[in-house]
Structures are given as structure tokens and as C-alpha cells.
Image: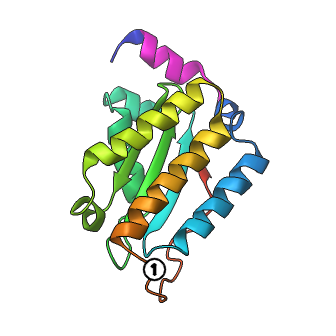
Amino acid sequence: MTPGRIARHLLVPHWVALRPFPASVLGRIESAIGSSERKHDGELRFAAEAGLPLASLWRGQSPRGRAIELFSQLRVWDTEHDSGVLIYVQLVDRTIEIVADRGINARVAQASWDGICRRMEAAFRGGQFEQGALAAIDEVTALLASHFPASGANSNELPDTPVVL
């Protein structure tokens, strides 16, 4: 962990995470997640945070490690069909990670998730936060619909509301 990275994480205020994701954008992300989940038996969560917490920095945690930690904390792993997916946006490092449950990982290659992340990062670099997030949700929806098509008995096991940490 470099001193510069630690300083960036500690000095960037929390509200920075809210700037690209005002309430109107978060509402559209929530609607997109709700619409997505009607097309498949997966569960989708979206989480964004400005910088890593001090404890994570101290441990030298990577954005991927933080995404896995949040996957657990948000209970994305705790779905009936092992079909939870977390889209994690970490703004200070400008990194996006997608973590999928074991049921999905058995059918979808990590390269597919990585491609979605890189396209979303490119949109964000261009200042297109809403478009990038919604396009990523559409891509995740297509993957989940092809591997976990809606069975009609899909209860909404996780909140659709995006989490801003």
C-alpha cells in the first residue's frame, strides 16, 4: 500500500461517492435491478463507495477483496439458488468489481464479468455514470437470463436499492 493511495482514500470525503450517483440515478438503478430480476432467478446488488475504510487500507485490501467482503456483508451469497451478483464501484481507485455466487460462477466465466467491468469503467471515465451502470446491469441481466431463466417463483430475496457506503 503506497502512502499516496492511503492519503487519497482517507482524504476523499464520503459525499464524493454520492456526486456521480444522485438520488435520481440511484432510483433508476433500483428500477433497472427490479426489472432485471423479473427476467431471471438471480439476485443483483449494486454498491458504491468513495474510498476504502481505514481498516481495509491498513490490511492492504484490494478493491476485489473489498468487493468480496461486501458480497458477504450484504448477504448476496445467501440466495436460494446461489445466484447472487454484486456490482461494486470503488471511486477513489476507479475500480469496478463484479462478484458472483458459486452457482453462477459454475456457468459464467470470470472473463465475462471482467469485460462488463472494463466497459463500465470506460463509461465512467467519460463521465457517463448512469449510462455505464445501466448498461452493466443490462449485460448482467442477459447473462443471468441465459443461465438462470425466470421460473415464475422468483421471490425478491435481496433489496433492489443500491447501497452507497
The residue lying furthest to the bottom in this view is 153
Q: Nearer the viewer, residue 138 or 13?
A: 138
Q: Is residue 139 above or below residue 44?
A: above
Which residue appears at 48% of the width and 83% of the height? 154
Determine whether 92 is above or below 47 in the image. Answer: above
Q: Quadrant of residue 65?
A: top left
The reply, left or right, for residue 17 in relation to residue 57 is: right
Mark 1 surroundings: few (<14), some (14-19) or many (≥20) residues within 10 A: some
Q: In which quadrant will I find the N terminus?
A: top left
Using the rendered image of the protein, determine whether residue 72 is visible from the camera's viewpoint. Answer: yes
- Give the residue displayed 57% in from the left and 32% down from the top: 123
Q: Residue furthest right?
A: 24
Please state, as top left, top right, bottom left or bottom right, where the C terminus lies in the image: top right
Q: Residue at x 26, y 68 (%)?
A: 103
Residue type (three-letter) at the residue carrying disc 1: Ala
Check disc 1 and report the residue beneath it: 150
Please report the bounds of the magenta region as a residue range: 4-13
**Residue 110 located left or right of residue 53:** left
x and y, in percent, of residue 79 in the image = 38, 74
Rendered location of residue 53, percent (x, y): 48, 34
| 3 versus 38 height, above or below | above
- Name the outermost residue toward the left: 106
Q: Please, what is the dominant secondary structure of the magenta stretch?
A: helix
Q: Position of residue 21 (x, y in %)?
A: 69, 41
